[in-house]
Image (cartoon, rainbow, N blue to C red):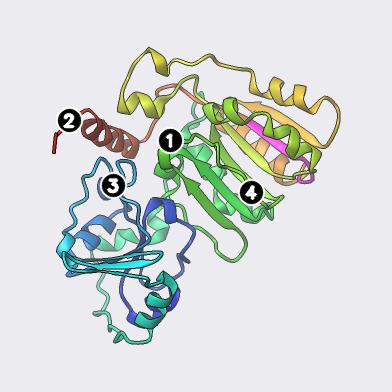
Amino acid sequence: MVDLAEASGYAVATMPSAKGLVPETLPRFIGTYWGAVSTAFCAEIVESADAYLFAGPIFNDYSSVGYSFLLKKDKAVIVQPDRVTVGNGPTFGCVMMKDFLAALAGSVTTQTPPPTKTTGGSSCRRGSRRRASLGSRCASTSYSSTYRRCSPETARSSQKRETRGSTARSSSCHKDAATPTDCCRYEFQMQYGSIGCDRESFSDNVCTLNHQLVEQVTAQDVSTMLRCDQKSIIFLINNGGYTIEVEIHDGLYNVIKNWNYTALIDAIHNGDGNCWTTKVTCEEELTEAVHTATGHNKDCLCFIEVIAHKDDTSKELLEWGSRVCAANSRPPNPQ
């Protein structure tokens, strides 16, 4: 994919689940394409293009923002692991993705970009895409400040090999964060609402960001992590509810029993192994916790429980939730 991007000179974007797979240092990288909640200007560039090539896409309700992409099938080349579909035309089977992309990279003509102008559109540069720091210190830790702390840059400073997030909420805040490809991987998963059941990793140095429901179904894995002397950093976001599902479909089933997660990890630790836990309620405490986890306790499994307000959310999640809700609540369409 990188060879094709460099050989063609075309603009390159990633879908949310593919963030971290393509270097964001490519000269024509324009951000994350996610329909109405894309990186600034990314959706407009992609959807107004004369043609687009998708490599290994998954177009479900989550990734397509409630099937609201403004794409035209006749302008698309869809490359799957073992087949290629060209527009509304034929599908060619037994064509491996890596072979197709390599052959295409060797046959395309390099496009010369037009002269760069200083316009309003220049705000889509990576530096300005970063979320602005909070103007004032909040009484409680916000989601945006937590995601800034649990960023690939944090993984770089603490020499972690991977940054991982679970559920669509993680991606809505991480999609515009620059991902350093020279030090660590970034992986995010939101398929099927699996809430963390697939967060396993072969690396022993991972910076992971999870919602409290993830911990309720995977807490027992911490025991194995301690036994294997993992040195990961786990940020647990505890907002006392299931806010992302509230934005899709509200109901009493989104009110969950809250746990004392640091006490749970301490009980699992039971004095056996290297483990450090803390609970933070404001940005100053979060900053201090990250400093401790990446400094004095860098050789421990660090568990940071972040207390956030139940209604704290991003405008992207509000937009995404309303569109997914509209798609999933529509009446059946018998065929």
* 56 vs 276, nearest the viewer: 56
**Which of pointers 3 and 4 lies earlier in the amino acid sequence?**
3
CA gap, disc 3 to disc 4? 27 Å
**Residue 64: which numbered mark, if any?**
3
Which residue is drawn at the image coordinates 35% and 23% (left, top)? 246
Q: Is residue 303 magenta?
A: yes
Which element is circle 4 on? loop
| Whether label 4 touches label 2, CB < 8 Å | no
**Which of pointers 4 and 2 lies earlier in the amino acid sequence?**
4
Badge 1 density bin: few <14, some 14–19, many ≥20, Cα 10 Å: few
Q: Which residue is mark 1?
A: 193
Q: Quarter holding the N terminus?
A: bottom left
CA gap, disc 1 to disc 3? 14 Å
Which element is circle 1 on? helix
**Which of pointers 3 and 2 lies earlier in the amino acid sequence?**
3
Q: Position of residue 157 (x, y in %)?
A: 66, 54
Q: Which residue is mark 2?
A: 332
| Mark 4: amino acid | Ser
Q: Which residue is mark 4?
A: 201
CA gap, disc 3 to disc 2? 19 Å
**Which of pointers 1 and 3 lies earlier in the amino acid sequence?**
3
* 15 vs 240, nearest the viewer: 15
Q: Which residues are magenta?
A: 298-304
CA gap, disc 2 to disc 1? 22 Å
